[in-house]
Image: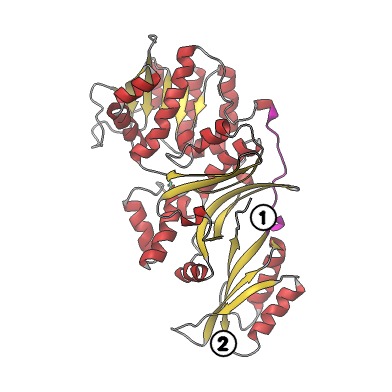
Amino acid sequence: MNNNKIKIGIAGLGTVGSGVINLLEKNKAEILKRSGFEISIVCVSASSKSKKRNCNIEGLNFYTNPLEMIRNESIDILIELIGGELVAKELVIEALEKKIHIVTANKALIALHGNEISEISNKEGCDVAYEASVAGAVPIIKVIRESLNANEIEWIAGIINGTTNYILTEMLKSKKDFNDVLKDAQDLGYAEADPAFDVGGIDAAHKLTILSSICFGIPLNFEAIYIEGIEDIELDDLNYAKELGYAIKHLAIGRKNNDGIELRVHSCLIPKARLIANVDGVKNAVVVSSDAAGPTLYYGAGAGSLATASSVVSDIIDISRKILSKSNNSVPLLSYQRNELQNKKILDINEIESRYYLRIRVKNKPGVLADITKIFGRKSISIESILQKEDLVNDENVPIVLVTHEVIEKNIIDALKDIEKLEVVKGKIIKIRIEELES
Ligand code: HSE
């Protein structure tokens, strides 16, 4: 390594990998002016050299096997952009053991193997930076680990999957159905290789695993997260929510309360007056509520080639500064000193308290509402508002839309089980939690 040059290798030349190559080229002079050093890509790896891609790899040493790349090349930083879990994990661990620093955009890797990777990086004295793994261009990792590090964080709530946000937004806007809109999102390159990860909430849960660890000082614990996708949300719910003054958003929520920590990913009704309720399309946004700073909101592109590359390159610059200044003083990988990470009680979803939006399809005849409200009464569930909607297609059955006061989830689940058994109730009841997101 010469004094003002950092050598990097890039594993993976998909959307983000090509974005990193293009951004380093496009803003070469600007980056040099800001950082004072040059970042030189010496090698890349991808499954095929001849594949048509949107970046120039001429003159770079090319490998089809990323392990071979790190064994043959002398680099300071490996940029892991392969995605997925297993190959990436083997590669990152071997690179750390060779004292190569890591920059990654891989949320699954950090969420599922970050505890082990943190231990190895600590032992080897190398950095692992992962800004691009959550919310693309939005610098939320840096904000939590650095800008808000004087605060105790109370709760965090984010729209951190662009695909689901795009689907919910487009369904309401264009009145298209779920599958058509998902197809558009895939064509636009937002969705994961397996879109079930997006619509089923897994991608958001990987990201919440990371955010909750750095917010609350707990080890990464993907298994503890309660996950629901957006599959049950219908256009009717989006319309009724709007009529009630809410937007439906798929949120990742982490909240510290007296009994433990809530970690959950699911759709919510959010009052339209909240800024985050107006974040539409593929955009991401995260609200962090902390004791000194109060609520702060971060918003921007959650995916995309140059947008995600912006976070990757920023991590490269941070690590390069540390290498060049020969400093050992890094921000801890998971924000807290390693010996300060503590397993805390994660609340079961049954224990949380919320208000609920419920849509119940019932037979249109006298006495039905009385039967339903009797069951709510038995479970101490108080109803805040109730509306019976017209069904223009079939007036034998009609939807009833109810909003409850705050209640423990277990009571709602028990009540809905009993209500679904009533002869007059048709099909599954739609239940969506309501989040006020007040500090
Ligand atoms: N599939 C992800 C999303 C891409 O839709 O947000 C960025 O992680």
Quadrant hosting residue 367? bottom right
Name the outermost residue toward the bottom.
366
**Quadrant of the snapshot with the N terminus:** top left
**Residue at x-position 72% and y-position 70%:** 381
Image position of 248 (left or right of 54):
right
Tell me the number on the disc at residue 74. Answer: none
Image position, residue 258 (x, y; %): 75, 47
Q: Which residue is mark 1?
A: 349
Image position, residue 174 (x, y; %): 35, 66
Question: Principal SS element in the magenta part?
Answer: loop
**Residue at x-position 64% and y-position 29%:** 336
Identified by mark 1, the residue type is Ile
In magenta segment, residue 214: no
Image position, residue 417 (x, y; %): 67, 71
Image position of 282 (left or right of 61):
right
Residues in magenta?
340-353
Indicate whether 425 appears above or below 117. below
